[in-house]
Amino acid sequence: MTSYRVGGALALALALAAPVFASDETAVAPLGQRAWSHVTFGAVSAPAVPARLAIAFAAPAPADMPSASAQRPVAYTYSDGYETRKKIHKYASYATLPLFIAQAYAGQKLYTDGGSTAKSWHDALMAGSITLFTVNTVTGGWNLLESRKDPNGRTRRLVHSLMMFGADIGFVVTASLAPDDDDEGGGGSGSRANHRAAAFTSISLATASYLYMFFTR
């Protein structure tokens, strides 16, 4: 009976050891080498990145990035004459609002009360207004022509110039509607009213242009 047990145990040991025998009939691979033969140490590939994340974190193309030249103002060189005319235009414009106030007061006084004193003041202030607008129209128009190729502040210059040219036309119309000297500022009520309306319209347009240039400089 003992021999049967020994034989059974030997048969069981041979059955368990059968998988470790090599195909070669004369050589048997060690058990450790056989166990690691199915393990591969290949290169580890990086995990795949989802398409949305790849697009979100992608670096912008050079064409999409704003260039420094697009953000930097374009340099433009002006002549010495431009700078001189600019100073004359600037300092002469300081007299605009005081002259308008005095002219409006004298004109209203002449419109309501008449009299030679009010007419004298009105005529003197009118001469000052003509001189001021002649100087500023010449210097401003000349500089506008020279700066036509400069893109910096072009809209601001054009708006100011168009409003001032409109005021110039308004003042010419105002002068053409002035009553005759023989009437000492009296004239017909319609003529005085039209002259007054044209004067205040021109003054309002010129004042708006002046304030626009002053607060946007």
Image: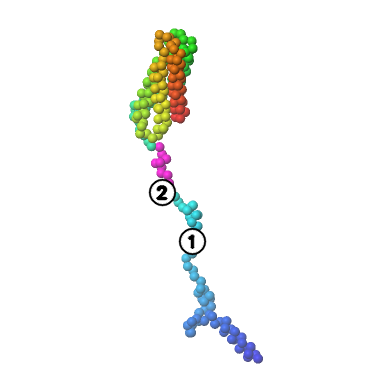
* Residue toward you, 5 or 87: 87
Q: How is the image coloured?
A: rainbow
Residue 151 locus on image (x, y percent) = 38, 35
Image quadrant where one finds the C terminus: top left
Q: Which mark is residue 132?
A: none
Observer-side mark, 1 or 2, equals 2
Image quadrant where one finds the N terminus: bottom right
Q: Residue at x 52, y 81 (%)?
A: 21
Q: How far apart are labels 1 and 2 at the CA level?
A: 27 Å
| Range of residues picked out in magenta | 65-73
Circle 1 packing at 10 Å, graded few (<14), some (14-19), many (20+), is: few
Residue tagged 1: 46
Q: Residue at x 50, y 79 (%)?
A: 29
Secondary-structure class at tag 1: loop
User: Can residue 59 be seen in the rendering of this structure?
Assistant: yes
Residue 46 locus on image (x, y percent) = 49, 61
> Which of pointers 1 and 2 lies earlier in the amino acid sequence?
1
As drawn, 55 above or below 75: below
* Amino acid type assigned to the residue bearing label 1 in the image: Ala
Residue 125 locus on image (x, y percent) = 42, 15
